[in-house]
Image (cartoon, rainbow, N blue to C red):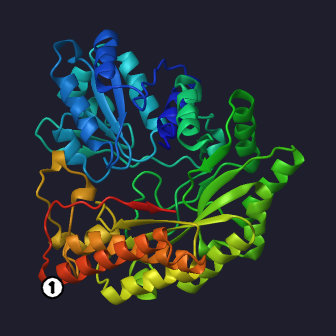
Amino acid sequence: MKPYPPLGILYLSAWLDRHGVENTVFDTTFSTRESLQTYLLEQRPKIVALYTNLMTKRNVIAIIEFIRNQNSLQDCLIVLGGPDVTHNTDGYLGAGADLLVIGEGEQTLLEIANCGLQIADFKTQVNRDPLRVIGNLNGLACRLPDGSVHRTAPREKIRDLDQLPLPNRQKINLQKYLNAWKQAHGHSAVSLSTQRGCPYTCRWCSTAVYGQSYRRRSPKVVVDEIEWLQTHYEFDLIWFVDDVFTISHKWLQAFRDELEIRSIRVQFECITRADRLSEDVVQMLKDCGCFRVWIGAESGSQRIIDAMDRRVDVQQVRSMIQASRRAGIQAGTFIMLGYPGETESDIRETVEHLKVSNPDLFTITVAYPIKGTGLYEDVQTSIHSALPWVDRTDRDLDFQRNYSRRYYDYAVRWTVNAVHWHKAKLAGRGFSFPGLKFFGKMMLARGGMVWWRMVGSNEAGEVNCPAISK
């Protein structure tokens, strides 16, 4: 129960509003599919634009199927955007989408909408002769009458993000999000974006929408948005959704100064990299109001970190986790097991890394290949899944590893409980009931690892969900 509003959709809505295009946001977070279906049948929109990622894929396809099966919605043009469409164009067009927006969506969706306003039978014309109707619009993929997939020229990215209007939070009931947080956790949180793109080249990470770029809103505009949020809502925390919040130390300093000049106080958490931190930067984060920073590590083995093209030193990760905690900032970190070439020795190094760095929080996931990434290219010849494309996400894909997928299920449990038992021992509670519980789970998980290392083999279709540990 830590829901955040769909900022990408709200940015699209605000952009359309600015240019006089009437639009409605149907937020499914606290709704039902039946409510959405009723809404579509009643309103019969000319264009339905849906956001897709590997978590929303199955629902998106179900919505497409519903629209396609309703006689009253046959004139509805279905447009998909988001990270999953870029490298799965054939699949989504085959599932019934009319147009796919590749990359940033604001200007592309506006141009689609303007075409739709000018052409009475827009969907029919698009399907009959797409190149004549939308062939001059950049950033699109469509199906041609001969069945082939056509992509128009790439859309140029928005360079000056300050020209973007604030995301259209008025189009949804944000209070429901705040209430959900408050009821589940005793505090409420909102999300906010300050930048687009990431210049780093981690091989498992998708950059399908914003690319390997770094574009950022000015500190003044970001603080304007914070001030607007504080004026219109009561909330406790901000989650900055940026990939690397401290990538620019100059920007961070200006952000701190802007908050101070305007006497605006906030509490926030963010993600960054150890190589974009230092003792001084940690203090700047503290001055800005950061209460928690997530520092990417992925592995405690330098060999695996280098294979991921993380371009960071594991010792520096440990140092910055410890520095953040000394400054009074909670430190979280990300761990990935099952990367190609990883051995049990590497996993042991990861456990040792977590013990030494001692983060307040850590998340663990088993590596999975997202189409379009370097990791996918590396393992493409051994990728397998028991599910057809329409029924699976990238999380359902497996590939040839050193050990079976079941082995990594137990490796995750072993890592979590080994670290918890270590923390319990440090606190003098190693042989208390909770401490012994961690020890027992650790030993059982270790036994599972040994068993599946001996007899296991890769099984298609098995999925391990991320474990979040405190």
Residue name at image x 24 percent, y 45 percent: 150
Residue 129, can we see it? Answer: no
Q: Considering depth in this image, is 194 or 148 the residue closer to the camera?
A: 194
Give the side of residue 146 with respect to residue 393, left or right: left
Location of residue 265 in the rendering, given as x and y in whole percent from the top left corner: 80, 46
Location of residue 424 in the rendering, given as x and y in whole percent from the top left corner: 54, 75
**Image quarter for residue 295?**
bottom right
* Image height of 359 relative to 8, above or below: below
Q: Considering depth in this image, is 183 or 426 the residue closer to the camera?
A: 426
Give the side of residue 109 with respect to residue 121, left or right: right
Location of residue 269 in the rendering, given as x and y in whole percent from the top left corner: 63, 55
Give the side of residue 240 with respect to residue 310, left or right: right
Location of residue 65 in the rendering, given as x and y in whole percent from the top left corner: 18, 29
Q: Which residue is mark 1?
A: 454
Residue name at image x 57 percent, y 44 percent: 185
The amino acid sitting under disc 1 is Met
* Image height of 277 relative to 187, above or below: below
* Image height of 116 relative to 213, above or below: above
Which residue is the extreme one toward the top? 42
Secondary element at tag 1: helix
**Image quarter for residue 273?**
bottom right
* Image height of 13 relative to 263, above or below: above
Number of marks present in the image shown: 1
Residue name at image x 48 percent, y 73 percent: 435
